[in-house]
Amino acid sequence: MSNVSDRKNAWSPVRLVESIGRRTLKGIAELGYIASLFIESLYWLIMGKHRRQPVRIASTFSETMMIAIEAIPIVSVLCFAVGIMLAIQSIATLKIFGAEAKVVIGIALSVTREFSPLIVSILVAGRSGSAITARIGTMHESQELDALQVIGINPVRYLVTPLMLAMLISVPCLTILGDFMGLLGGAVFTTLELGMNISTYADRSLDVLTVDDIRQGLVKSVIFAIIIVMLGVSNGFMVRGGAEGVGRATTRSVVLSISFIVLADMIFTYILNR
Amino acid sequence: MSSHQHRTEESDATGHPQSPAANSSSLPQEVIRIENLVTHYGQRQILDKINLTAYRGEIMVIMGGSGSGKTTLLQHLLGLKRPTSGNIYILDKDITKISTDEMHDLRRDMGVAFQGGALFSSMTVAENVQLPLREHTRLDNNTINIMTRLKLELVNLAGFENLMPSELSGGMVKRVALARAVIMDPKLLFFDEPSAGLDPVVSAELDELILRLKQAMKMTIIVVTHELESAFKIADRITVLDNGRILMTGTVDEIRNSDSERIQNMLNRRPRKEAINADEYMQRLTGQ
């Protein structure tokens, strides 16, 4: 009998095609799994009460506390810094055309439509998405998920639905906070740099901004929230291989979440601005 | 099918298999019946035509070495895995065919204590124990707390209600898991490796506890273990698995007196003679 490991290592075009095919199928299966998880958690969100297994409100609150309330300081600091950074770049660019006063338009639109939902989501993905994967992965490895099932508790209803609800509340709320802090950061630098009155800055921002600009950011934040929670949870459920497996899944969850957030941002920016 | 299995699955004069739990004047009531269970991981066959019956009120120990398929068999019994073929009847319901809702109802009659306890690390001991009651019943808080205390007393852990699982020793974790498993007074209790990772004294205490539970609650108990001493102490009947097949099912004495070389090797802790082929092992792992 030929050595199995030698055969496995041998390179050939057929093996390459096989490998690509296998990975593609695995990717499709994973997407299907994530979609089924999403549909199941929506089902429990809507039908849980009718089936006398409602969403755990206490758990939703504690998850919201972890995802949103505890993230307020870091979201505030980062969005404030992004606002300042945008103001610096915009003033430097607009100075070429002698249009520094137009900096308000650039900051207001880019913060609300783009930067606030993006920065908040990347931050939540790194902070809470990774925590979700690690927690569910550890529960999987210590048979806690099996224990839930044999007790007769659906793990999706018990764990995923409260997380999804909490994420759907938290990310848009943090985005609104991010909008405010980003605009504030831009205002602070602009008033210092251009000597503009802060109330003038606020008036101009309100003149420029429409409800649609805020809504655009919020629509994105909802999509990003679903991406974060679904990738966090699915990677947690798929953990294999003990502590090392949990570590790998956590890294994968964060990398995939940020990648999908950026890609989804590009697609939705295109769609929403047509 | 081996001659041992034929011998132990033989029928008595009434056409029903002999059971130590059976009263001579009444027929033993089947709680679990497994028929021709076959299961695979990928292309690798894990269980091969398993036929097994457990009766009301007995302690059935499933034994076998590492990789014998006992954990997979337990996962099938718990409805955590779907078999390739075959049927598993638990309390007269074929769990390979019933709906999710029916399985959900059936689980109220089943309690499970996992190998590592599987206690929820974010909950206290009391919260862990009372979780099934909170999910499946509409009892008020006082009643739930009283029932929790009673079950914790049963496992000698009264007063530990407010500790977190991380503050417990290995033996205490298993006892809390046992209290959680019996909180709904199930008809059927599964216990995975009760002695694993415990010192002999704590292990013996757990054996006593299992026997006490059987006496007090009249439940059928299925224990998966590879600890000979513990198995011989608690079992009414023992099923020995090897390479995914049942080598033998019988009483403690029948197992002890078996003329099967593999069983005698296991009982006398003799190493296997056949060497493991590296390529074959790799093929088994990769399924290629």
Image (cartoon, rainbow, N blue to C red):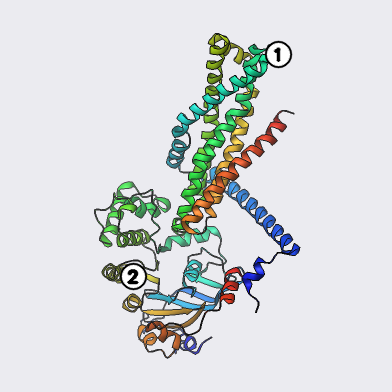
Rendered image quadrant of residue A7: bottom right
* Residue B113 horizontal/vertical position (percent): 39, 63
- Answer yes or no: are tags 1 and 2 on the same subunit: no
Can you see residue B246? yes
Quote the CA–CA distance across marks 1 and 2.
89 Å
- Give how far across and how far down residue B141 sits, in percent: 33, 47
In this figure, which residue is indicated by the disc labeled 1? A97
In this rendering, is residue B180 above or below B34? above
Q: How many marks?
A: 2
- Which element type, helix, strand or loop, lies under badge 2? loop
Q: Chain of mark 2?
A: B
What mark, if any, has residue B218 been given in the picture?
2
**Of B183 and B250, which appears nearest the observer?**
B250
Q: Quadrant of the C terminus of chain B?
A: bottom right
Image depth: mark 1 or mark 2 in front: 1
Does B64 sit above or below residue B209?
below
Query: Is A15 in front, or is B128?
Result: A15
Chain letter for the residue marked with disc 1 in the picture: A
User: Could you say where residue A108 lies in the image, as x and y percent from the top left?
Assistant: 61, 20
